[in-house]
Amino acid sequence: MMAEVEQKKKCIFHKFTYCGMDLGQLLDIFPEQLIQLYSAQQWWILNWGLQRKQPSLLKHLSKAKKEAPLMEKPEVAKTHLWDIIMLPKMAASMFGVYYSKIFNQVEIKPEMIGHYQGEFSNTCNPVKYGRPGIRSLTPQGSSLSSILFGQ
């Protein structure tokens, strides 16, 4: 019984840090300083500027966060963007990433900062190769019925 109590005391929770800074510090620093923490490719994309749809998505996320009641998850922001870089102000938001007919829901956690949104939602299926379909057997210019029925 005493060993179980000691094991519970030893349980240490991992505190999230990105480049040695916790989430509160990341939210407080200026965007120019934040960009310097990202990798070279992400730094280049963020310095070049966000595309047309990305700022509107950020506005929608901040609006959903403000309207959400305390201790509740915010409304899902549906989007087709999968190439947006996760920023600290996106933490604790909900995305719906478009995938064929549905929107895959993804909750943004602090550990996702610095990654692309597409890394957390499968947006394409690998091609399954197998036997060719019936159309691939028909030569160009001939009708399907002449091949099947020998006419």
Image: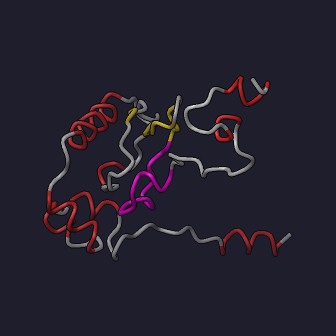
Residue 97 placement: quadrant:
top left
- Count of numbered tags: 0
The residues colored magenta run 106-120
- What colouring style does the render use? secondary structure
- Which residue: 43% across, 39% down? 95
User: Eyeballing the image, is 39 above or below 103?
Assistant: below
Specify whether residue 23 is in view: yes
Q: Is 79 in front, or is 147?
A: 147
- Which residue: 64% across, 41% down? 136
Instruction: Answer whether residue 47 is magenta in the image.
Output: no
Residue 2 placement: quadrant:
bottom right
Q: Position of residue 24 (x, y in %)?
A: 30, 60
Q: Position of residue 21 (x, y in %)?
A: 32, 71
- Which residue: 30% across, 73% down? 39
User: Eyeballing the image, is 56 above or below 23?
Assistant: above
Residue 57 placement: quadrant:
top left
Residue furthest out toward the right: 1
Residue furthest out toward the front: 151
In this rendering, would 61 be left or right of 6? left
In this rendering, would 79 be left or right of 62? right
Q: Is 25 in front, or is 147?
A: 147
User: Looking at the figure, which quarter contains the N terminus?
Assistant: bottom right
Specify whether residue 30 is in view: no
Q: Position of residue 47 (x, y in %)?
A: 15, 63
In this rendering, would 131 be left or right of 44? right
User: Eyeballing the image, is 95 above or below 16?
Assistant: above
Q: Position of residue 114 (x, y in %)?
A: 35, 63
Q: Is 146 in front, or is 121?
A: 146
User: Looking at the figure, which quarter contains the C terminus?
Assistant: top right
In this rendering, would 52 be left or right of 82? left
